[in-house]
Image: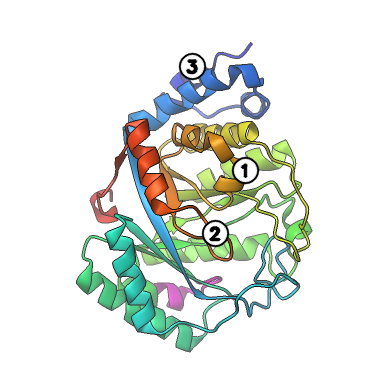
Amino acid sequence: MIDFNHLAEIVLAGEELTDQQALEVLTCPDDQLLPLLHAAYKVRKHFYGNKVKLNMIINTKSGLCPENCGYCAQSIISKAPIEKYSMMKKEEIIAGAKRAAELNAGTYCIVASGRGPAARELNIVVDSVKEIKRIHKDMTVCACLGILNPEQAVQLKNAGVDRYNHNINTSSNHHENITTSHTYDDRVTTVNHVKKSGISPCSGVIIGMKETLHDVIDMARSLRVLDADSIPVNFLHAVDGTPLEGTNELNPRYCLKVLCLFRFINPTKEIRISGGREVNLRSLQPLGLYPANSIFIGDYLTTEGIESSSDIEMLKDLGFEVDLKPLNQYQ
């Protein structure tokens, strides 16, 4: 039987898990789940103590996307009955930042659907961010606008964007099973443009899209190579009307094992429990914060979250504290 505490020790010593050790984490017997969580928490506590980062999303443009991502209710091939609207006004985006500040969300995520931002959309985000940073000086502003070129990344950096999210979503081997309207390398290239501009890179995954265990390991290792500072781990919330409608491969215990793996392979990074945690982790959501140190509060893009006050109560019950330190104090 594997000694998970030993895994924590070798990770803290700077070593990487072997593929066999990574597989043993994902296939951990359910009766060994608590020792696994304890070991992952040992690593998480070493780097983050009992602090939890809160993030809030605003969906500034919904639907109207030409991409064919199989998981997404906003894609051109989706038949999901979602609300569709063009880019919000600057005032609405700024008002969202005020709401995030009231909820103690240290990171405010400005998200827009589409392959990449049109010039008008980028200008709205740039103007909004400048005003948000003037009003909320310690707020970390993250943008998620799709594929960027180097000039667009620099524009966002100069406006005050602290972090940019562009998920790899799945492994390079599985990518074409999920979308064909852009490549895996397109996503990696955008993350590298962001890094070169001086913006903190955020990139994560969606678990539960018919990938293999080896794909999951590959995702975690790829993000280590990309050196993503923040790693959102989404669990598929299969939406009716999308190609992945009816997919239901996950259970709460496996989701926890995935979070532990990502902590072991990316020990120093922000691991964020993201979309789908409510429907996939269910009653075991609190245990997810033993390997992870970050969550979204409020709603997601086209699916609802839970009342933010419930998340705050969960943190209090766990004895964890909200991490209010701005991103620039970590750099």
Residue 216 locus on image (x, y percent): 66, 41
Q: Is residue 287 left or right of residue 75?
A: left
Residue 79 visible here: yes
Give residue 5's mark. Answer: 3
The disc, 3 or 2, on the residue closer to the chain's N-terminal end is 3
Q: Residues within 10 Å of mark 3 (few under 14, many from 20)?
A: some
What residue lies at 38% left-to-right and 76% top-to-bottom? 93
321 to the left or right of 37:
left
Question: Of the residues shown, which amino acid type is indicated by label 2?
Answer: Glu
The residue at which mark 2 appears reads as: 304
Q: Relative to 282, is 13 on the left or the right?
A: left
SS under mark 3: helix
What x and y, as percent, mark residue 164? Answer: 44, 63
Tell me the mark number nearer the camera, choosing from 3 and 1. Answer: 1
Quadrant where the N terminus is found in the figure: top right
The type of residue carrying mark 1 is Asn
User: Residue 276: x and y, percent?
Assistant: 59, 50
Give amino acid for label 3.
Asn
Q: Secondary structure at mark 1?
A: helix
Lower position in the chain sequence, tag 3 or tag 1: 3
- Residue range in magenta is 145-154
In the image, 70 versus 212, the foreground residue is 70
- Disc 2/disc 1 C-alpha distance (Å): 13 Å
Left or right of 303, for residue 44? left
* Magenta span includes 148: yes
Q: Residues within 10 Å of mark 2 (few under 14, many from 20)?
A: few
Circle 2 SS class: loop
Q: Is residue 14 visible?
A: no
Tell me if residue 153 comes above or below residue 102 in the rendering.
Answer: below
Q: Which of the two residues, 106 or 68, is positioned nearer the viewer here?
A: 106
Residue located beneath label 1 in the image: 280
